[in-house]
Image (spheres, grey):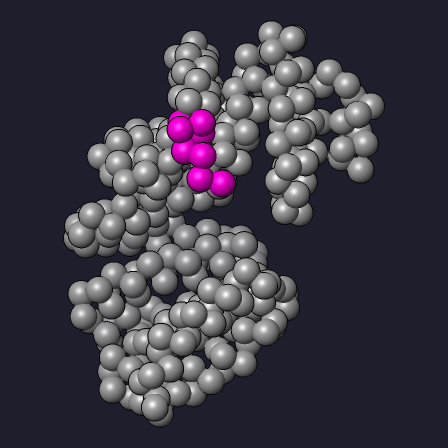
Amino acid sequence: MLCAAAELAGDRPWYWIDCGRARETLGDLDAAMTAYEKARDVTKAGHQIREHAAAQTDIANLHHQQGRHDEAADLYRAALTVFRNEADQLDTPVAQYNLSTSLDKIGDLARARGDLASAEAAYQESLELRRALAARRDTPQAQRDLSVSLNRIGDLAQEKGDLARGEVAFHESLKLRRELEAQLGTPEARRDLSLSLDRIGDLAQARGDHAAAEATYQESLELRRALAAQLDTPQAQCDLTISLYNMTRVTLGLSDKDQARAFYDEGLALIDRLHPDDQAEMRKAFAKLGGAFD
């Protein structure tokens, strides 16, 4: 439907961009690239600078996903220049948000290439923009965007071995997500909260504090049990399986082998209900734990 509308719209780029995103969601990356390139060509012909940058970003995302990092980097940098110029000229919330999102793309790619210093610089600038936006527009979306930026900072700090800085960022994000879950009570807000709890648990595990890890993983597990019962989607079942994997690890660390085995068996039984890509990943993860029960 979206792609048929794009054909009818002709020179209206957002129809092509939406068509590409729909095809990308369905896993048809070649068709998505064709739609994004059509959007890029339309915007170039019509001198639509912002829309051209948006199309370039979506094309770069596909290059990034498929490991063509040099191609992605060139397009991300070109888009960043456009969004930075727009933010300097307009200073609107939308322009500042677009700039922060573009910086995140630059940071994600730099991190994937192992350039952690460049990733940190981009993430930090994005975080500052999102703090300002959250202060300027105290909306749930602005607060969630800020929590996402904090998690990027925390993930990178953890990757660099700076657990203290990671913990500060993760706890600030967790506080925001608790507030959003209490305010909104939506499945999306509950899932966000569970993801933040997992990050806190992972840090506690890395420090060897199994008791603290168990407490946060347990809270995440309870949220995900409820979400899996409510939604019964492959994503919700995958999240629940990850929580059961985490609980298996942490209870093994606490030398509670019987409880660990119960979590392990429950998680293993769920794997067939997952998306095929997730099945392979989770089977591999559980296989590494299986030796503990031999």
Asked whether, in this view, residue 162 is left or right of residue 5, the answer is left
Is the C terminus in the top left, top right, bottom left or bottom right quadrant?
bottom left
Residue 36 vs residue 243, the one in the foreground: 36
Is the N terminus in the top left, top right, bottom left or bottom right quadrant?
top right
Point out residue 133 in the picture as x, y percentages from the top left corner: 40, 30
Point out residue 256 in the picture as x, y percentages from the top left corner: 29, 88
- SS majority, magenta: helix
Point out residue 29 in the picture as x, y percentages from the top left corner: 62, 40
Residue stretch in magenta: 66-73
Asked whether, in this view, residue 183 is left or right of residue 202, the answer is right
Name the image quarter holding residue 77: top left
User: Where 209 falls versus 105 (above or below)?
Assistant: below
Count of picture labels: 0
Determine the residue positioned at 23% across, 74% down: 210
* Residue 60 appearing in the image: yes
Asked whether, in this view, residue 185 is left or right of residue 120, the answer is right
Name the image quarter holding residue 254: bottom left
Determine the residue positioned at 62% across, 32% down: 33
Residue 100 vs residue 132, the one in the foreground: 100
Determine the residue positioned at 53% across, 23% down: 56
Determine the residue positioned at 38% across, 57% down: 196
Point out residue 212 in the picture as x, y percentages from the top left corner: 25, 71
* Residue 97 appearing in the image: no
User: Where 240 falls versus 98 (above or below)?
Assistant: below
Is residue 111 within the magenta segment? no
Asked whether, in this view, residue 156 is left or right of residue 25, the answer is left
